[in-house]
Amino acid sequence: MSQKAKSRTHVNCTINGDEVDFLTTDSTSLLDALRDEVGLTGAKEGCGTGDCGACSILVDGRLNCSCLMLAPEAEGTEITTVEGLAEGDHLHPLQQTFLEGAALQCGVCTPGFLIAAKALLDENPDPTETEIRYGLAGNLCRCTGYDKIIRSVQEAAVQLKGA
């Protein structure tokens, strides 16, 4: 059966605070649905096997690799993507510290690191360096190394505590 002949499933969920409806097939990954059906291209496919973290999103507040989740599984969930971190033109402290700390280069891994760091700071607002490294262990970067990323998360934690 061709892709076009497959039946489509209606999915209703909340993405970045907005109610969203889209049609998808039962075999479509949530990553592909976010990118192709919803138009949110921040999450990237780095590996397609859940090993790199580039496609990380929050589903009901929990960190998930969107390449490993089927789109119909999003029914009724609340999803946060990297596009949902900023409030209008005001960057989330993580985004600002990544920018100021030069914690990015090519940008493929950055959305996943930002989402993983947000999940970490939501659960542990005052992490140690070791806890940050452990919290981001599922994310791979092939360009920057990790020191600038770790320092940026540490600085964002300080800023968020002061807010």
Image: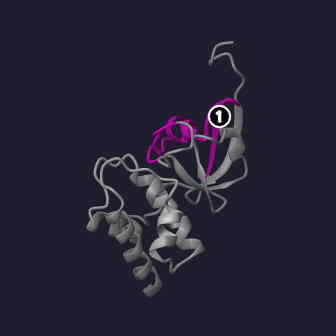
User: Is 20 located above or below residue 97 in the figure?
Assistant: above
Residue 124 drawn at (x, y percent): 56, 76
| Residue at image point 61% right, 36% down | 29
**Which image quarter: residue 25?**
top right
User: Is 93 located above or below residue 113 in the figure?
Assistant: below
Residue 129 visible within the image: yes
Q: Relative to the observer, which residue lies in front, 87 or 123?
A: 123
Q: Is residue 56 left or right of residue 1?
A: left
Residue 71 drawn at (x, y percent): 65, 39
Quarter holding the C terminus? Answer: bottom left
Residue 125 drawn at (x, y percent): 53, 78
In what element is the residue under mark 1?
A: strand
| Residue at image point 58% right, 60% down | 17
Q: Which residues are magenta?
A: 19-47
The image shows a total of numbered marks equal to: 1
Q: Is residue 61 left or right of residue 83?
A: right
**Which image quarter: residue 5?**
top right
Q: Disc 1 residue type?
A: Leu
| Residue at image point 37% right, 67% down | 91
Quarter holding the N terminus? Answer: top right
Q: Relative to the observer, which residue lies in front, 21 or 24?
A: 24
Residue 21 drawn at (x, y percent): 64, 43
Q: Does the magenta segment cover residue 116?
A: no
Give the labeled residue for mark 1. 23
Q: Does the magenta segment cover residue 32?
A: yes
